[in-house]
């Protein structure tokens, strides 16, 4: 309870009559109690009881402390028990609906900003049983010697009786329904706006001005002593450039509203031009009707101003003005939140950018470009990264990876992992060794995050690519004829998890980048979207990759703009493109090298799948099946008759006619023997099949074993058919 040593300057003494008991009859909001227990017919009735008999109560609001004292009569009006109210005005939200609270706040804010000594407003409360009750609040605003408000003394009373069956009630209800719809529409539309750009899209989009009951609007922000208009809708033409940015002064209505912190309401365009002569040269741009200029104040800070215009002249009612102020408050809160979001996002993306390479090294024999986009929604940053590393002997290391999570911790782990992986690669280690050491490094960071990664060691002079991946997407390759291939690249577990599960093995796959071909590496943010299978995203990427421009920079822009920027893209994205120009380097031989482990039952099937994809890229045609069968037989021979695995190599020899050479190498020095199996034998036909299918075959000794080889002549494709593919 608030106390005061004596009467206030306005003549009110809050000490009077504070200790009288509350009125009875709390259950029925419309029943007026006829008497109080224990009071005789002729006993004097105190002030509090007189008020309670008339469904009326008082409040004492200390603005400095934010404490509002309600007497028992006021608690009755709000249908509150004493233990349900703690003195904080926000405690009334259980009885005052949000739209009614906005109107009350607007009426009080207007009175405080105008410096008046009183205010009043009708509003509704929702009783304990859910029924609505019309209420009226009226307050006297007390000011100190400096003219600043410090206290409000007022009354609240039930108003259902005086408004019942009256034209005023019908009018108020209809107007409040309209205003409620407007408040709800504006609130819902702005609730989804995260950035300042989102807020301006809501205000200038379809139905933007109509949500405010206006035909046009202007929105501006204050910054550095200047006022800048950032959103325009419904004007009669383009707003002149010199009017979009101005000094903060009283020569323009929006600027004056921001400086004075007071709204202004004008009935017509003529009244507007008379008050602001500076607008006269641009009068044709402005609508002919009424206008409102409202300061946007959030947490006692002016952040801008909002101008609303109508096509019809009108004198705005108190209710309409209060609604406009309430809507301006919603816009101010949204803009403040959006400004904070933009600042946080700028900081987050700046942090992410500092952890990515500042520049790419010059590479010999090729061209490389990268793209990175932070997440399209939210303020979080991600762990996607790329890197291009100059390696010994003129080779180049290419990395694309993604650390689990979308926060600053993921970005910090990414920065450490990128530097460690770069160091291991620069030492000249093989791709498998680089990923093994990077996985061990991540496991020792004492973090619960894991990372996926693809690492490519490229020799652009020969076109050879050594690829290893850790739970990440493999590369895509587009050749000079725009044929896109997604080669099968064996991989291991994500970095960090590989050590935890004891499977730190990242097998390498050798690919070949022909002259005129382009290699693509990316993170899943480019191909994965909520509610869509990732294979659909990969198909879309392949189609866009194949149909994209020839120039590398334009291709990168096209892929990142048209795929990543699709609606629903929420993840961050890293993209890396490597192009080997046509005619670069000496003539080389396309080659595929794969290793099949002795104890890997699925190895042969994986080799056959990789062979099919590679031979399709080489346009091997009908000979593809023969190469697959021969490879299966030679691999089975190595795994069955030796104690080692098999190293499979396939080359496209540039002779005329073209030939495909298949080699399967093992570590056994035992020479193969041709057998003559009987009709019922279950083995011994492998070399017979190879001899029957291949044009040539043989065996060669190697330093640590031997290699069986065979060659197949590739039939020439008709020119028309080649163009179609």
Image: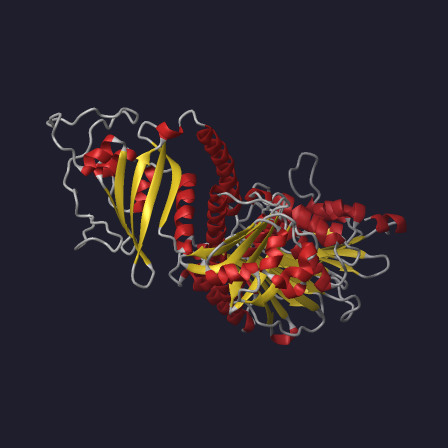
Q: Nearer the viewer, residue 566 or 258?
A: 258
Q: Nearer the viewer, residue 713 or 582?
A: 582
Horizontal side of residue 26 vs 488, given as left or right: left
Q: Residue furthest right?
A: 719
Residue 648 in sight = no
Name the quadrant containing residue 227. bottom right
The number of numbered badges drawn on the structure is 0
Q: Which residue is at 67% across, 34% downward?
A: 680
Residue 340 horizontal/vertical position (percent) = 47, 59
Q: How is the image coloured?
A: secondary structure
Position of residue 243 relative to residue 4, above or below, is: below
Q: Which residue is at 55% across, 59% downward?
A: 254
Position of residue 282 relative to residue 422, above or below, is: above
Name the quadrant containing residue 575. bottom right
Q: Which residue is at 70% across, 68% downward?
A: 367
Residue 37 horizontal/vertical position (percent) = 13, 26
Q: Nearer the viewer, residue 719 or 635?
A: 719
Q: Residue furthest front?
A: 42
Q: Which residue is at 89% across, 49% downward?
A: 720
Name the quadrant containing residue 430. bottom right
Residue 285 in sight = yes
Residue 634 horizontal/vertical position (percent) = 67, 50
Residue 3 horizontal/vertical position (percent) = 18, 51
């Amino acid at each position: 309870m608030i106390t005061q040593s004596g009467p206030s300057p306005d003549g009110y003494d809050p000490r009077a009559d504070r200790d009288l008991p509350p009125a009875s009859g709390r259950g029925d909001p419309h029943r007026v109690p006829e008497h109080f227990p224990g009071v005789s017919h002729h006993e004097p009735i105190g002030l509090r009881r007189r008020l309670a008999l008339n469904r009326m109560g008082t409040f004492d609001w200390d603005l400095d402390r934010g404490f509002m004292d309600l007497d028992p009569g006021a608690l009755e009006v709000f249908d509150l028990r004493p233990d349900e109210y703690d003195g904080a005005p926000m405690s009334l939200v259980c009885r005052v609906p949000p739209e009614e609270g906005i109107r009350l706040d607007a009426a009080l804010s207007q009175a405080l900003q105008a410096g008046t000594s009183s205010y009043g407003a009708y509003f509704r409360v929702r009783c304990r049983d859910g029924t609505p009750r019309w209420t009226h609040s009226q307050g006297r605003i007390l000011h100190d010697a400096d003219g600043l408000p410090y206290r409000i003394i007022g009354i609240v009373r039930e108003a259902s009786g005086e408004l019942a069956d009256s034209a005023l009630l019908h009018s108020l209800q209809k107007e409040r329904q309209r205003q409620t719809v407007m408040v709800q529409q504006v609130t819902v539309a702005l609730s989804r706006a995260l950035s300042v750009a989102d807020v301006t899209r809501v205000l200038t989009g379809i139905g933007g001005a109509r949500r405010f009951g206006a035909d046009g609007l202007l929105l501006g922000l204050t910054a550095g002593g200047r006022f800048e208009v950032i959103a325009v809708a419904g004007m009669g033409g383009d707003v002149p450039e010199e009017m979009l940015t101005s000094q903060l002064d009283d020569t323009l209505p929006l600027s004056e509203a921001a400086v004075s912190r007071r709204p202004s309401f004008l009935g017509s365009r003529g009244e507007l031009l008379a008050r602001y002569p500076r607008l006269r040269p641009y009068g044709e741009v402005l609508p002919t009707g009424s206008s409102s200029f409202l300061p946007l104040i959030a947490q006692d800070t002016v952040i801008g101003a909002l101008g609303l215009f109508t096509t019809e002249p009108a004198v705005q009612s108190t209710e309409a003005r209060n609604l406009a102020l309430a809507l301006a408050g919603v816009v101010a809160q949204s803009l403040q939140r959006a400004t904070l979001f933009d600042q946080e996002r700028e900081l987050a993306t700046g942090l992410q950018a500092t952890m990515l390479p500042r520049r790419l090294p010059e590479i010999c024999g090729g061209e490389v470009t990268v793209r990175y986009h932070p997440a399209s929604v939210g303020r979080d940053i991600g762990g996607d990264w790329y890197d291009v590393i100059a390696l010994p002997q003129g080779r180049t290391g290419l990395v694309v990876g993604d650390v689990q999570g979308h926060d600053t911790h993921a970005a910090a782990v990414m920065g450490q992992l990128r530097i460690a992986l770069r160091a291991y690669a620069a030492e000249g280690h093989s791709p498998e060794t680089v990923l093994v050491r990077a996985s061990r490094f991540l496991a020792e960071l004492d973090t619960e995050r894991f990372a996926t990664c693809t690492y490519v060691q490229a020799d652009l002079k020969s076109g050879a690519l050594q690829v290893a991946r850790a739970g990440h997407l493999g590369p895509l390759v587009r050749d000079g004829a725009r044929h896109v291939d997604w080669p099968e690249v064996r991989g291991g577990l994500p970095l960090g998890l590989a050590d935890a599960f004891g499977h730190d093995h990242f097998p390498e796959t050798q690919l070949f980048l022909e002259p005129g071909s382009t290699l693509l590496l990316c993170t899943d943010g480019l191909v994965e979207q909520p509610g869509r299978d990732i294979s659909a995203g990969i198909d879309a990427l392949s189609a866009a990759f194949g149909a994209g421009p020839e120039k590398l920079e334009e291709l990168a822009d096209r892929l990142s703009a048209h795929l990543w920027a699709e609606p629903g893209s929420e993840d961050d994205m890293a993209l890396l493109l490597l192009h080997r120009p046509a005619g670069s380097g000496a003539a080389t031989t396309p080659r595929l090298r794969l290793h099949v482990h002795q104890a890997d039952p699925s190895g042969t099937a994986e080799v056959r799948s990789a062979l099919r994809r590679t031979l399709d890229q080489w346009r091997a045609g009908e000979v593809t099946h023969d190469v697959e069968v021969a490879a299966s037989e030679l691999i089975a021979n190595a795994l069955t008759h030796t104690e080692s695995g098999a190293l499979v190599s396939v080359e496209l020899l540039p002779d005329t006619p073209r030939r495909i050479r298949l080699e399967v190498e093992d570590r056994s020095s035992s020479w193969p023997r041709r057998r003559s199996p009987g009709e019922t034998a279950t083995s011994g036909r492998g070399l017979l099949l190879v001899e029957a299918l291949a044009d040539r075959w043989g065996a060669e000794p190697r330093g640590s074993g031997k290699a069986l080889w065979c060659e197949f002549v590739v039939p020439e494709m008709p020119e028309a058919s080649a163009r179609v593919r």
